[in-house]
Image (cartoon, rainbow, N blue to C red):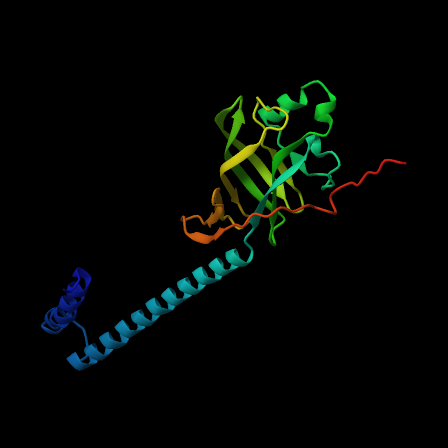
Amino acid sequence: MLSRNTIIAIISFLVIPVLINYFLLSWRAPRVNGSEGDWLGFLANYIGLIGAVVIAVIQFTKQRESDIKKDIEQNRSYVDIQDFNAKLMLVDTKTHENSRIIMTEGFESLLMKPVIPEYENLKISYLKISHYGTAPIIINCNIEVQYNYILDGVQKHKGEKYSLASIEQGIEVFVPLVPIESTQGMSIEMVSLKFEYSTLKNERLKLIRLYNPTIETLYGEKEEVIYCEELKLVNWIFPNKQTMQRKAP
């Protein structure tokens, strides 16, 4: 069955010549020179010129859109978010001097606890965020994390949201995953992670990571999928970021 647009195109193709014959060739304006054949030749050239201009504009617009899309893709900034375990305040961990820790409510509560031996070597879970690409910075960053933890034998859920004005290239941002009721040896089970940010090319991107299984998807401004991958998590260390200390014999 023919579509509505196809039917309209067929009718237009049949009717337009009749209308031209009726409105242009059935009468003559005063003081106008030229035969019917001359006017038909002029009309054909005129319509051909308009068609050529329209085609040129369409091609220019498509080429410009293609160039803009290619430029955005080639200069796109990506984020790298890793699970990271380290001591409080990143003690014994080497990182950039301008790297920062987000002072979450649970993290601040943990820092206010009395300094006792069991907390001297306490390691907690962080999300380590950095970005890579040609641009030196990403802006308007929003992060949302959802995780579970066990307290007194009961599973509890925690959701947190944070905003950052910018993240510079080479800088690492650490998000402590610490509930306000955090205790020694408490384990964290991630549920989901969402990170939204803008690039210097005015592109708004959204990274969503779901756990168990771990699937990471990057969405563009129009919710188009840029990539979607299942991540195979492995255990690893940062040998160049650890300060090795030995006690003298």
Indicate the quadrant where residue 128 lies. Answer: top right
Dividing the image into 4 quarters, which one contains the C terminus? top right
Q: Is residue 27 left or right of residue 48?
A: left
Residue 159, position in %: x, y? 49, 30
Dividing the image into 4 quarters, which one contains the N terminus? bottom left
Residue 135, position in %: x, y? 60, 51
Nearest the viewer among 56 and 215 is 215
Residue 232, position in %: x, y? 54, 50
- Report the residue that reaches farthest toward the right: 249
- Report the residue that reaches farthest toward the top: 114
Q: Is residue 229 left or right of residue 177?
A: left
| Residue in view at x 62 percent, y 26 percent | 107
Nearest the viewer among 41 and 139 is 139
Counting labels gives: 0
| Residue in view at x 17 percent, y 62 percent | 3
Image position of 211 with respect to 18: above or below: above
Residue 153, position in %: x, y? 51, 23
Image position of 32 with respect to 72: above or below: below
| Residue in view at x 26 percent, y 72 percent | 47
Nearest the viewer among 175 and 83 is 83
Nearest the viewer among 173 and 179 is 179
